[in-house]
Structures are given as structure tokens and as C-alpha cells.
Image (tube, helix red, strand yellow):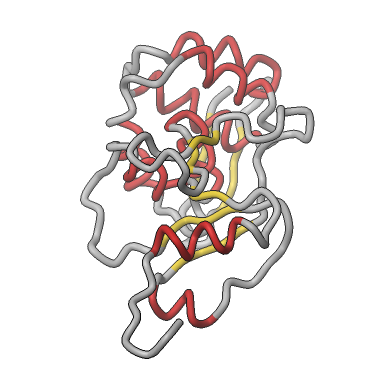
Amino acid sequence: MFPGDTLRREDCLKFLSRRVPGFHVGGKTALAWRGIRHNLPAREPLSLLGEVRASLPDWFQKRFPSRYTARNPFSLKLPKNFGLQPLPEIPDGVLVSVPERALLEMLTEVGVHQGVEEARNIMEGARSLRPEVLATLLKHCERVKVARLCVCWAEELNLPWATSARKAAGTRLGGSRWTARLKDGTLLVLKP
């Protein structure tokens, strides 16, 4: 960067995507960029994911507050880059999770960096998910919490794709209650 230049977020993200395997914009950020949001604050950190542990450069973090994780809810059998596409208005841009993948990535963060109530409110706006894409992702989802949150909340919120989500999650839901104490002290209890 030369003195007086301004770094553009999209260019910086593309730069990082060439250096970090599997790098993409996901979770709550991808949902917001694709039009599914709930009271998004102006300076919400970017939700970035990749396949390997990595640290984002300080110069990037100062300009674009972000959270990066290599925590992947999907099995390695999920085809590479399934559910990842650039935004339609930036066809050569960085990969961004499609809404179905972004929803499951956001649910992975519930209790870690994502509040329960906000996640549920965002999910309520995800009425037009594609059942076949979500089904593929749920079949490859290895996190019980994620599959159960997706199915339970979809049914509670009467989302149009709830039945197909339950069918796709199948045995991943288990047969007994799932209970966890979240980082903020909240007790999360999910029925099968």
C-alpha cells in the first residue's frame, strides 16, 4: 500500500483467500450479505472461516474487525466448496457461504461468539432456504448441536423447510435430550 491509498475490503479478502486454504466469508456475515439479518450493528466483526488454523494480519484486523475460525461443522466427505459462491454482484470476488451453509456455520457459533436469542431471530428470517441444499449440508454435519438447533428452531418457527431438515438430519439428532451449558452460563436443552 502506498501512502494515501485506501485498502478495499473485497481486495483484502481476496488476498487472504489466496493464502489460507478454504478461506471464505461465512456465518452471520454471509447471511447478512445475502439479505438475511436481524438488527446488524454497524461494526459487527466479519465472520471468516478456513480449513486451517491461521491468524489474520494486524493491518487487516485494524481496518476490518473480524473473527476467523477453522472450526468446520461438516465432514470431509462434503464436496470441496459445496455451498460457497461469490456474491452475484461480484462474480470474481471472495467465496461467501450460501444462506443454507451460512446458517449452519452461524449455529456452530451459538454459545461461543453468537447469542442464542439473536441466532434464533436471524433464523426466523431464513424462510426461503433451498431444502435440497440444506439437506446435503445436514447429511454432512458432524455437530449434534448444530443439527438439533436447526431442526428444533425450524419446527418451532414453522419454517417451510423444517420437515425436510428433520428428514435430512436423521440419526444425527440422536434419541435423547441434548444439554449444554453455554459460555455465557445459559443452559441449552434441545429435544431429539
The residue nearer to you, when weighing 169 against 16, is 16
The residue nearer to you, when weighing 68 against 147, is 68
42 versus 36 height, above or below: below
Q: Which quadrant holds the N terminus?
A: bottom left
On screen, residue 103 versus residue 69, left or right, reads left
Q: Residue at x 37, y 34 (%)?
A: 88
- Number of labels in the image equals 0
Q: Residue at x 38, y 76 (%)?
A: 63
Measured from the top left, where is residue 30 in percent x and y?
A: 41, 44
Q: Residue at x 75, y 34 (%)?
A: 75
50 versus 190 height, above or below: below
Q: Residue at x 58, y 10 (%)?
A: 167
On screen, residue 39 versus residue 138, left or right, reads left
67 versus 158 height, above or below: below
Measured from the top left, where is residue 22 in percent x and y?
A: 66, 48
The residue nearer to you, when weighing 94 against 189, is 94
On screen, residue 62 versus residue 157, left or right, reads right
Q: Which quadrant holds the C terminus?
A: top right
166 versus 37 height, above or below: above
